[in-house]
Image (cartoon, rainbow, N blue to C red):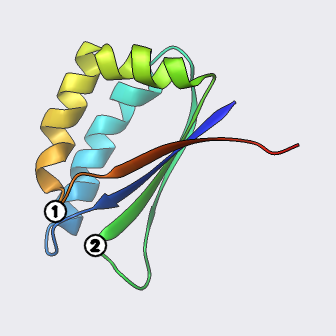
Amino acid sequence: MILEHAVLPVRPGDESAFEVAFDEARPLISSQPGFRNLSLSRSSESPNLYLLLVEWDSIEAHTDGFRTSNEHQNWKRLLHHFYESFPTVEHFVAVP
């Protein structure tokens, strides 16, 4: 299992609209092969920062699957204009 970690810096004042758009975008990612689960959390200290955690079967399910799909194009259309700067994305593996 791979855990995708993305810090999403939403433009201040656009948080509510971002959350509505994210709810619309959620099925686009959850329907992808290799998708397991996701959570979206909002920072208490910096309310315009969100933490997106997505569990995938593999890095390739995210990078070669979702990122090359038509659904990803719709994901970008719905969400990317909210970002103050491009999100930082990293992939993690569990430490036994």
Q: Position of residue 71 (x, y in %)?
A: 27, 20
Describe residue 78's horizontal placement relative to residue 4 as left or right: left
Give the distance between the C-alpha atoms of the residues marked 2 and 1, in whole angstroms.
9 Å
| Residue 71 numbered mark, or none | none
Describe residue 68's horizontal placement relative to residue 59 as left or right: left
Residue 13, by quadrant, is: bottom left
For image coordinates 16% across by 39% down, the residue present is 78
Image quarter where the N terminus lies is: top right
Is disc 2 surrounded by few (<14), some (14 to 19) or many (20+) residues within 10 Å? many
Front one among 90 and 9: 90
Residue 75, by quadrant, is: top left
- In this picture, is 13 found above or below 34? below
Q: Position of residue 47 (x, y in %)?
A: 33, 78
Outermost bottom residue: 45
Image quarter where the C terminus lies is: top right
- In this picture, is 57 found above or below 22? above
- In this picture, is 15 found above or below 63? below
Describe residue 91's horizontal placement relative to residue 8 as left or right: right
Q: Secondary structure at mark 2?
A: loop
| Residue matched to label 2 | 48
Q: Secondary structure at mark 1?
A: loop
For image coordinates 36% across by 52% down, the residue present is 88
Is disc 1 surrounded by few (<14), some (14 to 19) or many (20+) residues within 10 Å? some
| Residue 84 numbered mark, or none | 1
- In this picture, is 17 found above or below 54? below
Asked if the residue at tag 1 contacts the one at tag 2, i.e. Cβ–Cβ closer than 8 Å, the answer is yes
For image coordinates 34% across by 26% down, the residue present is 28
Q: Position of residue 19 (x, y in %)?
A: 28, 57
